[in-house]
Image (cartoon, rainbow, N blue to C red):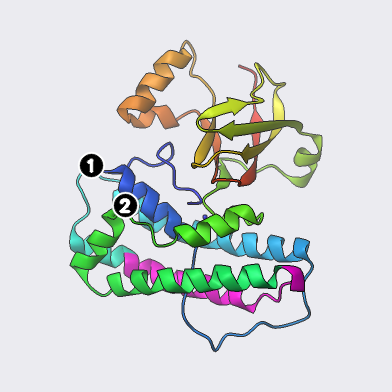
Amino acid sequence: MNRLFPTSRCRSLSLVVVVVVSALLVNACSSDDSVKRTGPRLTKEQLLAKANGICVTLDDAVLPIIEGLVKNEKAPTPKQSQKALRDVVPLYKKAFDDLRRLNPPKDVEKMMDQFIALNDKAFEGLNKAAKDSEQAQIFLNSDDDPFRPALEIADRNDLDECGTGGSRANEELTDAQRKAATQVLVTSSEYAYAGLPGQVPAGPLLLRFVNKGTELHELVVTKLADGQTLEQLLALVDTGEPESDTGNLGFASAGPEGSTELGVMTTPG
């Protein structure tokens, strides 16, 4: 869930920490082969719903730990980095076991097997790093993301909450609000965006965000403060000022060939 630890939500000491940690949020893995698939085969829709739900639950549990690690201006110490990894490893294991129990339909079984195998391999590095403070700090600051292959598989197979993409709204829409929402399709490709409307009616807004490019793209819905211009807001974002986050209603990110949905409640202004 690279679900989804973008710089617009949390100020960290370096982009590397943000990117690597965000990749961890959505991929809980272990090499416990004793956990087997159970129950009847799921439909593809059921599989996606259950798998994405597991990743969202993991994200909600891990995010406070990582935010606590990077909330200060000083870089985390090796011991702080190790503690963070130790705290998240059991959360990853539980989520991975839940994913492993899912019984996919035959036409996507191979994909799930590959997704799990790649996560297993990446998790070995995470688990090893959690056992040594110096290795933990190196792991968090490395620009070599071991989870990337698994993330890309999730992106290509509608596992939106388990890939590099995902979304989070400050106030989630209810089912009734989603049905009544103004719907907008936004696409991105190589840092260009299409489909962004000049204005939308106040009320529930449902954005379908599709990335057609080869890099991770992000979409943030923000309300300008009274008297604030877009140029002033962008200047705050560029300098990393936390005030740039105060008006955020939600964000979405999508990896290559990935997509996600973001539902927010807008007010006049």
What residue sits 60% from the left and 74% below the top?
113
| Secondary element at tag 1 | loop
Task: Using the rendered image of the protein, determine whether residue 220 is visible from the camera's viewpoint.
Answer: yes
Q: Is 259 drawn above or below residue 181 in the view shown? A: below
Pointer 2: what residue? 143
Q: Position of residue 31 (x, y in %)?
A: 47, 81
What residue sits 54% from the left and 38% below the top?
251
**Foreground tag (2 vs 1):** 2
Cβ–Cβ under 8 Å for marks 2 and 1: no
Pointer 1: what residue? 73
Q: Residue furthest top?
A: 227
Q: Nearer the viewer, residue 132 or 121?
A: 121
Q: Which stretch is magenta?
A: 85-107
Residue 221 position by quadrant: top right
Q: Is residue 121 left or right of residue 179?
A: left
What residue sits 66% from the left and 54% below the top?
158
Q: Position of residue 100 (x, y in %)?
A: 60, 76
Q: Is residue 73 left or right of residue 27?
A: left
Dot 2 alpha-carbon crowd within 10 angstroms: few under 14, some 14 to 19, many 20 or more: few
Secondary structure mostly taken by the magenta-highlighted segment of the chain: helix
